[in-house]
Each structure stands twice: as C-alpha cells, then as structure tokens.
Amino acid sequence: MIVAEHNVFKGLSVALFNQKTLTHGIDYVLEKINVKDDSIDTSKLKKMYDEFNIKYRQFVQNNLDKIKNDPKQLSVFANNARIYASDIKQIPGNERWDPSVRHNIPEVMANIFALWTLQHVQYYHDAQRC
C-alpha cells in the first residue's frame, strides 16, 4: 500500500486509525467478547479499562507541552512501564495472572499507550491541518 510506505502519509494513517477506533467504545467491545469454556467478568474489565483510560488521558494531557519542549521526556513513560512490569515474571506454559499482575496492568498499559501517543503527536497535528 503506497500510503503505508511513505512517511508523508503517516499522519493521515494515524488519524484514520484513531477515528475508526474511537467509533467503538468499551461497552461495544465488551459486548462482542466471546469466550469458549470460560466466563469473563466484564464489569471487572470495564473497571480496569476505566482506570487505564483515566491514567492514560492524564499522562497525555499533563505531558503534551513537556514533550513538545523536550522529547527526551518520553523515556519517563518507557521507564515507568518497565518499573511496573518488572515484578511480573511469567514462565512460558505456566503463566499466572494473580492479583499482583492484574493490579499493574492498567498502569503498564497507560504508560505504553501514552508513550506511543506522545511519540506520534506531530502526526495528529499534521493531519488536523489537512
């Protein structure tokens, strides 16, 4: 695909992706989850998503200007994700999702998503000008 191969179109691609994903909220996604042989507590998933979403939005909002002035600030999010994930030790074939692991997931994911968002913030602004 030509658009994916050229950096000049990256902003438009990111904007289109964001636009598509924003049309489906968490409730829509939770309704569409189908699991065989296991039940999922969607209320817990929603609670974890809400926790993630609040943290993610705070991280982005509070750091947008800092990143514009000093892009090196992005390393804070990578380091935070590493710190929260450092206690998570998984052995292939013997994965355990105990409460300590589940508790850290929203924080780890909020840092990872904030890092990606802030790394690509210039594409968002470029696409807005189109």
Image (tube, rainbow, N blue to C red):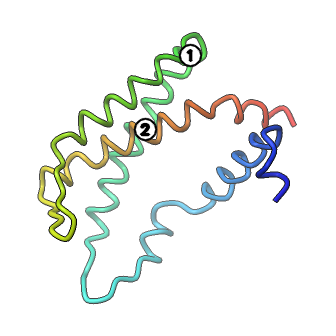
x, y percent for residue 82: 29, 36
The numbered mark at residue 47 is none
* Label 2 sits on residue: 56
Instruction: Categorize mark 1 by other alpha carbons within 10 Å: few (<14), some (14-19), many (20+).
Output: few
- Quarter of the figure with the C terminus: top right
Residue type at mark 1?
A: Asp
Q: Secondary structure at mark 2?
A: helix
Direction bottom: furthest residue = 37
The correct choice, above or below, for 62 with respect to 53 in the image is above
x, y percent for residue 71: 55, 17
Q: Nearer the viewer, residue 103 or 31?
A: 103
x, y percent for residue 40: 27, 75
Instruction: Categorize mark 2 by other alpha carbons within 10 Å: few (<14), some (14-19), many (20+).
Output: many
- Residue 81 lies left or right of residue 116; in this view the side is left
* Label 1 sits on residue: 65
x, y percent for residue 113: 46, 42
Quarter occupied by residue 109? top left
Q: Secondary structure at mark 1?
A: helix
Q: Nearer the viewer, residue 119 or 56?
A: 119
The correct choice, above or below, for 61 with respect to 54 in the image is above
Q: Earlier in the sequence, mark 2 or mark 1?
A: 2
Q: Could you tell me how far apart the alpha carbons at marks 2 and 1 are, in whole angstroms?
A: 15 Å
What residue sits 19% from the left and 71% below the top?
93
Q: Nearer the viewer, residue 64 or 92?
A: 92
- Residue 19 lies left or right of residue 78; in this view the side is right
